[in-house]
Amino acid sequence: MGYFRSGDRARRRAGAVRAADHQQRGNSGSQATSLIIRALALRELRLRDWWKVCGREIAAGLVLGAFLGAIGFFRIVLWQRLRFVD
């Protein structure tokens, strides 16, 4: 029975990290979409520039993902060192 309890604990911790990831993804996606639509409407951006925009969005996503992943990793390491348990 103890084997299953440790698995439950790991799933709860992973759920906390996933929640932060999903919240950030929704917010940044909404902002990026709004800015692109505005730029298209004001003719500051043309459809042929989509490669440039797409490249910047991918780069921003990778940086943000790495940052959130590092925070999650160090948070887990800290919890293990300080022996925080449920």
Image (spheres, rainbow, N blue to C red):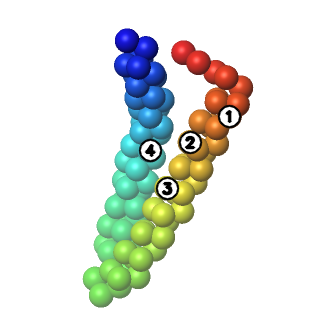
Q: Is residue 4 left or right of residue 61?
A: left
Q: Is tag 4's residue or tag 2's residue first in the polypeptide sequence? A: 4
Label 4 and label 1: CA atoms lie apart by: 19 Å
Is 65 in front, or is 23?
Answer: 65
Label 1 and label 2: CA atoms lie apart by: 10 Å
Looking at the rendered structure, the kind of residue marked 1 is: Leu
Looking at the rendered structure, the kind of residue marked 2 is: Gly
Q: Quadrant of the N terminus?
A: top left
Label 4 and label 2: CA atoms lie apart by: 10 Å
Q: Residue furthest right?
A: 82
Q: Which residue is mark 2?
A: 72
| SS type, badge 4 | helix
Give the residue displayed 36% in from the left and 53% down from the top.
Answer: 30
Q: Is tag 4's residue or tag 1's residue first in the polypeptide sequence? A: 4
Q: Residues within 10 Å of mark 2 (few under 14, many from 20)?
A: some
Q: Residues within 10 Å of mark 1 (few under 14, many from 20)?
A: few
Q: Which residue is mark 4?
A: 21
| Nearer mark to the viewer, of 4 and 1 | 1
Label 3 and label 4: CA atoms lie apart by: 8 Å
Which labelled disc corresponds to residue 65?
3
| Nearer mark to the viewer, of 3 and 2 | 2
Q: Which residue is mark 1?
A: 78
Label 3 and label 2: CA atoms lie apart by: 10 Å
Label 3 near label 1: C-beta < 8 Å?
Answer: no
Is 77 in front, or is 66?
Answer: 77
Looking at the rendered structure, the kind of residue marked 3 is: Gly
Give the residue displayed 43% in from the left and 14% down from the top.
Answer: 2
Looking at the rendered structure, the kind of residue marked 4 is: Asp
Q: To which quarter of the image does residue 12 belong?
A: top left
